[in-house]
Amino acid sequence: MEAAIKIKEETLKVFKKASSVAVLTGAGVSAESGVPTFRGKDGLWRNFSAEELATPSAFSRDPKLVWEWYSWRREIIRDIKPNPAHHIIAEWENTFNDFCLITQNVDGLHAKAGSQKILELHGNIWRVRCTKEEKTFLNHEVLSDNVPPLCECGALLRPDVVWFGEALPEGIISKALENIRRCELFFVIGTSAIVEPASSLPLIAKQSGAYVIEINIGRTPISHFMDDTYLGKAGEILPCLHSESLNLRE
Ligand code: BV8
């Protein structure tokens, strides 16, 4: 029998008082939906690591191999559903006056759960970009046979995601920083806090005066400076926090 999740008094007090809230999510928030995490045991594909495949050099060296990896991931996530963690986070958009969701995930599950104000730090697996014209468009096919896909102009199409060694979209990261610097309460949910510059965001929130709460099944390199760390599944802890807080908020 799973031990009941105990939400701390202090967490509930801060949660009740907060009007400006920001959330950073990583692959762990989608784990209970069946999306393989990057560094968990299921994070490997044909013995490659994400760091080897999610790079511009891997794509220029072997665009077919990189697209086969993305097609495999698209195949896995195409029909899966958001889990309670995504739904609670989507609900928070209407709970707090000032709310911002910042995600490292490219799976599109936050939008599927109804979140609208989303800052996608690392792009979106369902968008493609012409490597010549730079224009982007949505594309929901799995693409297993015709990889790498070509643009009408004849140039290669690439996934519209941020690869290792690529800069994050300027507008997105500056908007994330703006929200983080003004929020009173910051959640960091389901991330190993390894990938930069995303994993510095909780520290910036803390330094800007926010109360920072981590939710993860294990401890991470940033756990030591969290105000609260809840060890457990996001899909279980968030509903518990949400229901305990409901009767608190006027
Ligand atoms: C850049 C898109 C510079 C692609 C991804 C210092 C400063 C700046 C850069 C660096 C730096 N040090 C190193 C770098 C380089 C690099 C980097 O961080 N490398 C790492 C490996 C050390 N960073 C970059 O290259 C970034 N670019 O800095 O550019 C620049 C500036 C100007 C001009 C040119 C360049 C770009 C990084 C973006 C890479 N793209 N994704 C794709 O998806 O295909 S990153 C990839 O990792 C995903 O986005 C993923 O979300 C992200 C982070 O991983 P997590 O989400 O944390 O997932 P992970 O599996 O690791 O962990 C899951 C966690 O969930 C675990 O903790 C687990 O315990 C937990 N969990 C599991 N189940 C549950 C759960 N928690 C709760 N509930 C559960 N049920």
Image (cartoon, helix red, strand yellow):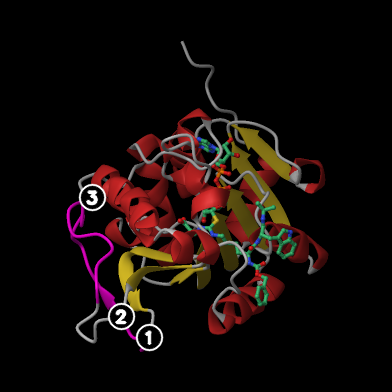
The spot of residue 157 in percent (x, y) is 31, 73
Q: Is residue 137 above or below residue 94?
A: below
On the image, the x and y values in percent for residue 94 come to 40, 66
Residue on which the image places disc 3:
78
Q: Provide the secondary structure element on which disc 3 rests.
A: loop
164 left or right, relative to 200: left
Determine crowd level at label 2: few under 14, some 14-19, many 20+ residues with C-alpha closer than 10 A: few
Q: Amino acid at mark 1?
A: Lys
In the image, the residue with mark 1 has its CB under 8 Å from the nearest atom of ligand 1: no
Task: Write the residue at 33% across / 62% down.
Answer: 111
Is 80 or 66 nearer to us in this picture?
A: 66
38 or 248, which lies in front? 38
Report which residue position mark 2 lands on: 155
Which residue carries the number 1 mark? 132
Q: Is residue 45 left or right of residue 143?
A: right
Q: Are marks 2 and 1 in contact (CB under 8 Å)?
A: yes
Q: Main secondary structure of the magenta part?
A: loop
Q: Which callout, 2 or 3, points to the residue nearer the camera?
A: 2
Q: Which residues are magenta?
A: 133-150
**Of the residues shown, which amino acid type is indicated by label 2?**
Ala
Quarter location, residue 208: bottom right
Q: Quick one: label 3 or label 1, which is nearer the N terminus?
A: 3
At mark 1, the secondary structure is loop
